[in-house]
Image (cartoon, rainbow, N blue to C red):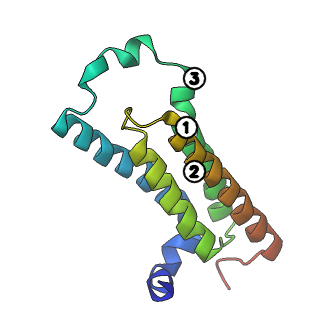
């Protein structure tokens, strides 16, 4: 596992803003394709127009927050923690993927997003405290 992380050290420590967008939209698209292919959510086809609430926008808002702050770190040339970035990347991908399956309880997705915020905060804190710049 450590060899795999070391292989992808550059994008995980320097390019998390781009990886955040790729993880969210990529896994969200994969989830939508699976749902549409196997007709998993056919019981309530009108759900989006009638039952759409602000809670449905939490995954998109959280991905936007992650992208923005990682972009600021990238522009400031501050590296992120390799392990925490890998965990955060996987949490974003899993939560975006599971968000498409409405048969699952939404609390699972919201729990993963909450855990993602904790990992993100820890990663941000360690990045700002250590101040490892990209040029080093």
Q: Residue under circle 1?
A: 107
Instruction: First in sequence, mark 3 or 2: give its number.
Output: 3
Q: Nearer the viewer, residue 61 or 17?
A: 61
Is residue 30 shown left or right of residue 77? left
Can residue 68 be seen?
no
- Residue lying furthest right: 129
Quadrant in which residue 51 is drawn: top left
Residue 49 position within the rendered picture, expressed as x and y whole percent measured from the top left:
39, 13
How many angstroms separate mark 3 from mark 2 (CA)? 20 Å
Graded by Cα atoms within 10 Å as few (under 14), some (14 to 19) or many (20 or more), the crowding at tag 3 reads few
Considering the numbered disc 2 on the image, is that residue within a helix, a strand or a loop? helix
Residue 73 lies, with reference to residue 126, above or below; the image says above
Q: Are marks 1 and 2 in contact (CB under 8 Å)?
A: no
Instruction: First in sequence, mark 1 or 2: give its number.
Output: 2
- Residue lying furthest bottom: 3
Residue 15 position within the rendered picture, expressed as x and y whole percent measured from the top left:
53, 66
Quadrant in which residue 79 is drawn: bottom right
Residue 13 lies, with reference to residue 64, above or below; the image says below
Q: Nearer the viewer, residue 127 or 35?
A: 35
Residue at (79% x, 76% y) in the render: 130
Considering the numbered disc 3 on the image, is that residue within a helix, a strand or a loop? helix
Q: Residue under circle 2?
A: 67
Residue at (73% x, 69% y) in the render: 127
Q: Residue under circle 3?
A: 54
- The quadrant the C terminus occupies is bottom right
**Viewer-nearest of labels 3 and 1?**
1
How many angstroms separate mark 3 from mark 1 (CA)? 14 Å
Instruction: First in sequence, mark 3 or 1: give its number.
Output: 3
């Amino acid at each position: 596992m450590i060899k795999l992380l070391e292989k992808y050290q550059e994008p995980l420590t320097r390019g998390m803003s781009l990886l955040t967008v790729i993880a969210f939209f990529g896994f969200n698209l994969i989830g939508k394709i699976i749902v549409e292919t196997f007709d998993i959510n056919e019981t309530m086809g009108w759900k989006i127009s009638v039952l759409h609430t602000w809670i449905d926008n939490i995954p998109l808002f959280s991905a936007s927050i992650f992208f923005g702050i990682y972009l600021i770190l990238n522009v400031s040339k501050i590296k992120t923690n390799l392990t925490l970035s890998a965990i955060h990347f996987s949490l974003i991908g899993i939560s975006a993927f599971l968000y498409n399956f409405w048969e699952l309880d939404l609390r699972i997705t919201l729990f993963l997003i909450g855990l993602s915020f904790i990992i993100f905060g820890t990663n941000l804190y360690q990045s700002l405290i250590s101040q490892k710049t990209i040029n080093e």
